[in-house]
């Protein structure tokens, strides 16, 4: 995998409107692997004072998206499943690590663990992705490309 492809994927992840709104950051991408982080805040809690399940899902999903797109072609979710195992503290940072389990020509499978900043397991997420034929580079506008001057 060339470095330009990984930079293009990182650029796509950094520009994801929902992830930016939520505050999720993808901090590492390698072929078949990604790590995302989210610092929790009061507005991300549910009515019982723990992180909303959708927030935990979102950080896992962002790591999943980065990992399955890290091969250089657009990949989209076909199926996901999450098990919530513990509630994180309201001021914790969630870290989701996605690891590729299988990479076929059209589908790939990922295992994502979400932990808090103390290393406590918060959720277990599994994802199945469909690989389109579209190269990631084709969805990054030339003026937005990682190496563009400006």
Image (cartoon, rainbow, N blue to C red):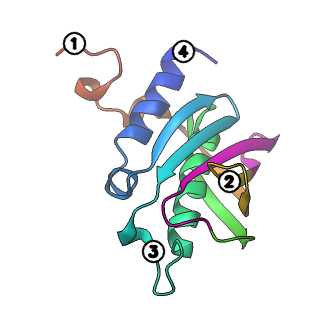
Q: Where is residue 25 in the image (x, y as percent from the top left)?
A: 45, 43
Looking at the image, the residue that sits furthest to the bottom is 47
Q: Distance between the residues labelled 3 and 1?
A: 40 Å
Disc 2 crowd, CA 10 A, few/some/many (<14, 14-19, 20+): many
Residue for badge 1:
149
Residue bearing mark 2: 115
Q: What element carries label 1?
A: loop
Q: Nearer the viewer, residue 79 or 88?
A: 88
Q: Is 105 colored magenta in this rendering? A: yes
From the viewer's side, name the closer residue of 135 and 119.
119
The overriding secondary structure of the stretch rendered in magenta is strand
As helix, strand or loop, the secondary structure at mark 4 comes to: helix
Could you give the CA–CA distance between mark 4 and mark 2, rounded to whole angstroms?
28 Å
Which mark, by number, is residue 3? 4
Q: Give the mark nearest the N terminus, 3 or 1.
A: 3
Magenta residues (range): 88-111
Say which quadrant the C terminus sits in: top left
Q: Earlier in the sequence, mark 4 or mark 2?
A: 4
- Spatial separation of the CA atoms under disc 3 and disc 2: 17 Å
Q: How far from the left and from the top, in percent, is residue 69?
A: 58, 39
For image coordinates 68% across by 53% down, the residue present is: 115
Do residues under tags 1 and 4 come within 8 Å of each other at their CB atoms? no
Quadrant housing residue 86? bottom right
């Amino acid at each position: 995998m060339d470095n330009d492809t990984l930079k293009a994927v990182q650029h796509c992840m950094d520009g994801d409107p929902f992830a930016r709104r939520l505050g999720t950051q993808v901090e590492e991408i390698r072929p078949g692997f990604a790590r995302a982080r989210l610092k929790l805040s009061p507005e991300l809690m549910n009515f019982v004072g723990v992180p909303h399940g959708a927030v935990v899902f979102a950080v896992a999903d962002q790591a999943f998206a980065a990992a399955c797109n890290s091969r250089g072609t657009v990949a989209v979710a076909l199926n996901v499943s999450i098990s919530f195992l513990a509630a994180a503290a309201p001021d914790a940072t969630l870290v989701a690590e996605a690891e590729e389990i299988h990479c076929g020509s059209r589908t790939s499978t990922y295992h994502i663990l979400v932990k808090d900043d103390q290393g406590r397991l918060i959720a277990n997420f599994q994802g199945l992705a469909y690989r389109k034929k579209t190269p990631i580079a084709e969805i990054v506008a030339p003026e937005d490309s990682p190496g563009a001057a400006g």
